Amino acid sequence: MSLSTSDRSLVELVIRRLNVMRPLSSEARASLEHALLEGLVRAGASEDLISEGDPVDSVRVVLSGWLCRYKTLEDGRRQIVNFIFPGESCDAHAFLLPVMDHSIATMTPVVYAEIKRARFESLTMSDRSLAEAFWCETLVNNAIQREWAINLGRRTALERVAHLFCEIFERLRPVGMVDGNSCVMPVTQMDLADATGLSVVHLNRTVQELRATGLIVLRDRTLTINDLDALKDAALFSPNYLQLYRPD
Protein backbone atom coordinates (compact mmCIF):
# COMPACT_ATOMS: atom_id res chain seq x y z
CA MET A 1 0.00 0.00 0.00
CA SER A 2 1.32 3.41 -0.92
CA LEU A 3 1.48 5.78 2.02
CA SER A 4 0.39 9.38 1.75
CA THR A 5 1.24 12.41 3.84
CA SER A 6 -2.28 12.24 5.25
CA ASP A 7 -1.68 8.65 6.40
CA ARG A 8 1.40 9.76 8.31
CA SER A 9 -0.48 12.66 9.87
CA LEU A 10 -3.17 10.23 11.05
CA VAL A 11 -0.51 8.09 12.71
CA GLU A 12 0.56 11.19 14.62
CA LEU A 13 -2.89 11.24 16.28
CA VAL A 14 -2.14 7.89 17.87
CA ILE A 15 1.26 9.07 19.08
CA ARG A 16 -0.30 12.22 20.52
CA ARG A 17 -3.05 10.31 22.30
CA LEU A 18 -0.71 7.71 23.84
CA ASN A 19 1.74 10.41 24.85
CA VAL A 20 -1.01 11.87 27.02
CA MET A 21 -1.19 8.53 28.81
CA ARG A 22 2.60 8.20 29.21
CA PRO A 23 5.44 10.25 27.69
CA LEU A 24 6.75 8.03 24.89
CA SER A 25 10.43 7.60 24.16
CA SER A 26 11.68 8.57 20.72
CA GLU A 27 12.38 4.88 20.06
CA ALA A 28 8.82 3.96 21.00
CA ARG A 29 7.40 6.61 18.69
CA ALA A 30 9.49 5.40 15.76
CA SER A 31 8.71 1.71 16.31
CA LEU A 32 4.98 2.31 16.75
CA GLU A 33 4.78 4.59 13.70
CA HIS A 34 6.43 1.91 11.56
CA ALA A 35 4.03 -0.78 12.81
CA LEU A 36 0.98 1.41 12.26
CA LEU A 37 1.95 2.41 8.74
CA GLU A 38 2.60 -1.22 7.81
CA GLY A 39 -0.84 -2.35 8.95
CA LEU A 40 -3.19 0.29 7.50
CA VAL A 41 -6.71 -0.90 6.67
CA ARG A 42 -9.74 1.04 5.44
CA ALA A 43 -13.37 0.14 6.16
CA GLY A 44 -16.73 1.63 5.30
CA ALA A 45 -19.49 2.70 7.67
CA SER A 46 -21.73 0.15 9.40
CA GLU A 47 -19.24 -2.72 9.20
CA ASP A 48 -18.41 -5.08 12.05
CA LEU A 49 -14.63 -5.18 12.50
CA ILE A 50 -15.02 -8.01 14.97
CA SER A 51 -18.06 -9.75 16.45
CA GLU A 52 -18.86 -11.20 19.84
CA GLY A 53 -17.47 -14.71 20.04
CA ASP A 54 -14.71 -14.14 17.48
CA PRO A 55 -11.13 -15.09 18.39
CA VAL A 56 -8.66 -12.19 18.64
CA ASP A 57 -5.17 -12.32 17.18
CA SER A 58 -4.36 -8.66 16.60
CA VAL A 59 -4.65 -5.14 17.97
CA ARG A 60 -6.62 -2.53 16.04
CA VAL A 61 -5.69 1.12 16.46
CA VAL A 62 -8.02 3.78 15.04
CA LEU A 63 -6.50 6.55 12.93
CA SER A 64 -9.67 8.21 11.63
CA GLY A 65 -13.41 7.77 11.94
CA TRP A 66 -15.74 6.69 14.74
CA LEU A 67 -16.50 3.20 15.98
CA CYS A 68 -18.58 1.75 18.78
CA ARG A 69 -18.49 -1.24 21.08
CA TYR A 70 -21.90 -2.86 21.40
CA LYS A 71 -23.84 -5.87 22.58
CA THR A 72 -27.13 -7.13 21.14
CA LEU A 73 -29.90 -9.02 22.90
CA GLU A 74 -31.59 -12.00 21.26
CA ASP A 75 -34.57 -9.85 20.25
CA GLY A 76 -32.30 -7.38 18.40
CA ARG A 77 -32.11 -4.61 20.98
CA ARG A 78 -28.65 -3.02 20.96
CA GLN A 79 -26.69 -1.30 23.70
CA ILE A 80 -23.66 0.77 22.73
CA VAL A 81 -21.23 0.43 25.62
CA ASN A 82 -18.52 2.83 24.41
CA PHE A 83 -17.38 4.88 21.45
CA ILE A 84 -13.89 4.55 19.97
CA PHE A 85 -12.29 7.69 18.55
CA PRO A 86 -9.19 8.46 16.45
CA GLY A 87 -5.98 7.80 18.34
CA GLU A 88 -7.55 5.05 20.48
CA SER A 89 -7.11 1.30 20.21
CA CYS A 90 -10.06 -1.06 19.87
CA ASP A 91 -8.71 -3.95 21.83
CA ALA A 92 -5.14 -3.47 23.05
CA HIS A 93 -5.19 -6.49 25.35
CA ALA A 94 -8.22 -8.45 24.15
CA PHE A 95 -5.95 -11.13 22.70
CA LEU A 96 -5.22 -12.27 26.26
CA LEU A 97 -8.74 -13.77 26.31
CA PRO A 98 -9.90 -16.57 24.00
CA VAL A 99 -12.80 -14.70 22.31
CA MET A 100 -14.43 -11.27 22.18
CA ASP A 101 -17.28 -10.65 24.63
CA HIS A 102 -18.72 -7.80 22.53
CA SER A 103 -18.74 -6.51 18.97
CA ILE A 104 -17.01 -3.50 17.43
CA ALA A 105 -18.60 -1.71 14.48
CA THR A 106 -17.73 1.29 12.35
CA MET A 107 -20.11 4.24 12.60
CA THR A 108 -18.38 6.18 9.81
CA PRO A 109 -15.75 5.25 7.23
CA VAL A 110 -12.57 4.53 9.17
CA VAL A 111 -8.85 4.06 8.75
CA TYR A 112 -7.22 1.78 11.28
CA ALA A 113 -4.01 -0.14 11.74
CA GLU A 114 -3.98 -3.84 12.48
CA ILE A 115 -0.96 -5.06 14.43
CA LYS A 116 -0.60 -8.80 14.87
CA ARG A 117 -0.28 -10.09 18.43
CA ALA A 118 3.38 -11.14 18.14
CA ARG A 119 4.36 -7.75 16.72
CA PHE A 120 2.41 -5.88 19.38
CA GLU A 121 3.93 -7.90 22.21
CA SER A 122 7.38 -7.31 20.77
CA LEU A 123 6.74 -3.55 20.64
CA THR A 124 5.51 -3.31 24.23
CA MET A 125 8.13 -5.66 25.67
CA SER A 126 10.95 -3.66 24.09
CA ASP A 127 9.80 -0.29 25.44
CA ARG A 128 8.32 0.28 28.89
CA SER A 129 6.81 3.68 28.03
CA LEU A 130 4.77 2.16 25.20
CA ALA A 131 3.62 -0.76 27.35
CA GLU A 132 2.53 1.59 30.13
CA ALA A 133 0.73 3.90 27.69
CA PHE A 134 -1.41 1.04 26.35
CA TRP A 135 -2.11 -0.25 29.86
CA CYS A 136 -3.12 3.27 30.92
CA GLU A 137 -5.49 3.40 27.96
CA THR A 138 -7.04 0.11 29.08
CA LEU A 139 -7.49 1.48 32.62
CA VAL A 140 -9.11 4.65 31.23
CA ASN A 141 -11.51 2.50 29.19
CA ASN A 142 -12.47 0.73 32.41
CA ALA A 143 -13.09 4.11 34.04
CA ILE A 144 -15.25 5.15 31.09
CA GLN A 145 -17.34 1.99 31.49
CA ARG A 146 -17.91 2.84 35.15
CA GLU A 147 -19.14 6.32 34.19
CA TRP A 148 -21.45 4.86 31.56
CA ALA A 149 -22.83 2.46 34.17
CA ILE A 150 -23.60 5.45 36.40
CA ASN A 151 -25.20 7.15 33.40
CA LEU A 152 -27.60 4.27 32.86
CA GLY A 153 -28.23 3.55 36.52
CA ARG A 154 -28.44 6.93 38.23
CA ARG A 155 -28.38 9.97 35.92
CA THR A 156 -31.54 11.50 34.50
CA ALA A 157 -32.08 11.56 30.74
CA LEU A 158 -30.82 15.15 30.46
CA GLU A 159 -27.78 14.39 32.62
CA ARG A 160 -26.99 11.28 30.52
CA VAL A 161 -27.06 13.08 27.20
CA ALA A 162 -25.21 16.12 28.52
CA HIS A 163 -22.59 13.85 30.11
CA LEU A 164 -22.07 11.98 26.84
CA PHE A 165 -21.62 15.23 24.93
CA CYS A 166 -19.08 16.46 27.49
CA GLU A 167 -17.17 13.19 27.32
CA ILE A 168 -17.06 13.15 23.52
CA PHE A 169 -15.82 16.75 23.46
CA GLU A 170 -13.10 16.07 26.03
CA ARG A 171 -11.95 12.83 24.38
CA LEU A 172 -11.61 14.52 20.99
CA ARG A 173 -9.67 17.48 22.37
CA PRO A 174 -6.26 15.76 22.91
CA VAL A 175 -6.10 14.66 19.27
CA GLY A 176 -6.90 18.11 17.90
CA MET A 177 -10.43 17.30 16.74
CA VAL A 178 -12.08 20.19 18.57
CA ASP A 179 -12.44 23.52 16.78
CA GLY A 180 -13.09 26.22 19.35
CA ASN A 181 -16.27 25.09 21.09
CA SER A 182 -17.34 22.71 18.30
CA CYS A 183 -16.60 19.12 17.30
CA VAL A 184 -17.91 16.71 14.70
CA MET A 185 -20.89 14.56 15.68
CA PRO A 186 -21.30 12.10 12.80
CA VAL A 187 -23.72 9.74 14.54
CA THR A 188 -27.45 9.23 14.29
CA GLN A 189 -30.06 9.80 16.96
CA MET A 190 -30.48 6.02 17.08
CA ASP A 191 -26.77 5.70 17.94
CA LEU A 192 -27.08 8.28 20.70
CA ALA A 193 -30.22 6.56 22.01
CA ASP A 194 -28.45 3.20 22.08
CA ALA A 195 -25.54 4.78 23.96
CA THR A 196 -27.73 6.41 26.61
CA GLY A 197 -30.35 3.70 27.06
CA LEU A 198 -33.16 5.96 25.86
CA SER A 199 -35.78 5.55 23.17
CA VAL A 200 -35.22 7.66 20.05
CA VAL A 201 -38.25 9.76 20.97
CA HIS A 202 -36.94 10.38 24.50
CA LEU A 203 -33.45 11.11 23.15
CA ASN A 204 -34.83 13.64 20.67
CA ARG A 205 -36.88 15.34 23.37
CA THR A 206 -33.83 15.55 25.64
CA VAL A 207 -31.62 17.03 22.90
CA GLN A 208 -34.33 19.60 22.18
CA GLU A 209 -34.37 20.49 25.89
CA LEU A 210 -30.59 21.06 25.84
CA ARG A 211 -30.99 23.18 22.73
CA ALA A 212 -33.78 25.22 24.30
CA THR A 213 -31.58 26.08 27.28
CA GLY A 214 -28.96 27.43 24.87
CA LEU A 215 -26.29 25.03 26.11
CA ILE A 216 -25.74 23.27 22.78
CA VAL A 217 -26.34 23.51 19.06
CA LEU A 218 -26.51 20.21 17.17
CA ARG A 219 -26.72 20.75 13.45
CA ASP A 220 -25.16 19.42 10.24
CA ARG A 221 -23.27 16.64 12.06
CA THR A 222 -21.57 19.21 14.30
CA LEU A 223 -21.94 19.70 18.05
CA THR A 224 -21.37 23.22 19.38
CA ILE A 225 -21.25 23.66 23.14
CA ASN A 226 -22.08 27.27 23.91
CA ASP A 227 -21.11 27.06 27.57
CA LEU A 228 -18.97 24.01 28.45
CA ASP A 229 -18.85 24.76 32.17
CA ALA A 230 -22.65 25.08 32.33
CA LEU A 231 -23.08 21.84 30.37
CA LYS A 232 -20.68 20.08 32.75
CA ASP A 233 -22.71 21.38 35.70
CA ALA A 234 -25.93 20.12 34.12
CA ALA A 235 -24.33 16.71 33.52
CA LEU A 236 -22.57 16.45 36.90
CA PHE A 237 -19.49 15.88 34.76
CA SER A 238 -15.86 15.81 35.87
CA PRO A 239 -13.19 14.85 33.31
CA ASN A 240 -10.87 13.34 35.94
CA TYR A 241 -11.73 9.76 34.96
CA LEU A 242 -10.41 10.39 31.43
CA GLN A 243 -6.89 11.09 32.75
CA LEU A 244 -6.31 13.60 29.94
CA TYR A 245 -3.85 15.85 31.68
CA ARG A 246 -0.67 14.79 33.43
CA PRO A 247 0.58 16.69 36.47
CA ASP A 248 3.72 18.66 35.66
Image (tube, rainbow, N blue to C red):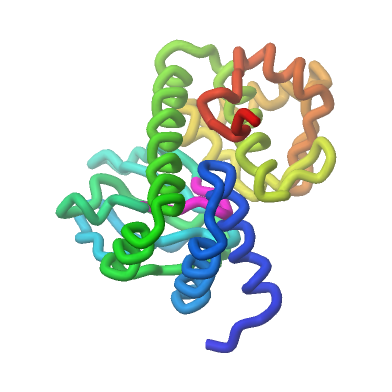
Please give the name of the residue rendered at 81% of the width and 45% of the height, measured from the top-left corner. 179
Please give the name of the residue rendered at 43% of the width and 28% of the height, measured from the top-left corner. 143
Expressed as whole percent of the image width and height from the top left, the position of residue 30 reads 54, 69
Q: Quadrant of residue 245?
A: top right
As drawn, which residue projects farthest toward the bottom?
A: 2
Of 20 and 113, nearer the camera is: 20
Expressed as whole percent of the image width and height from the top left, the position of residue 32 reads 48, 66
Left or right of 230, for residue 166: left
Q: In which quadrant is the C terminus drawn?
A: top right
Please give the name of the residue rendered at 60% of the width and 33% of the height, measured from the top-left corner. 246
Expressed as whole percent of the image width and height from the top left, the position of residue 91 reads 36, 52
The answer to if 89 sits in the magenta stretch is yes
The answer to if 217 sits in the magenta stretch is no
Of 54 and 213, nearer the camera is: 54
Q: Is residue 42 visible?
A: no
The residue range painted magenta reads: 84-91
Up the image or down, 165 lies above or below 112; here it is above
What secondary structure is the stretch in magenta mostly built from?
Answer: loop
Up the image or down, 183 lies above or below 148; here it is below
Expressed as whole percent of the image width and height from the top left, the position of residue 159 reads 59, 16
Q: Quadrant of residue 173?
A: top right
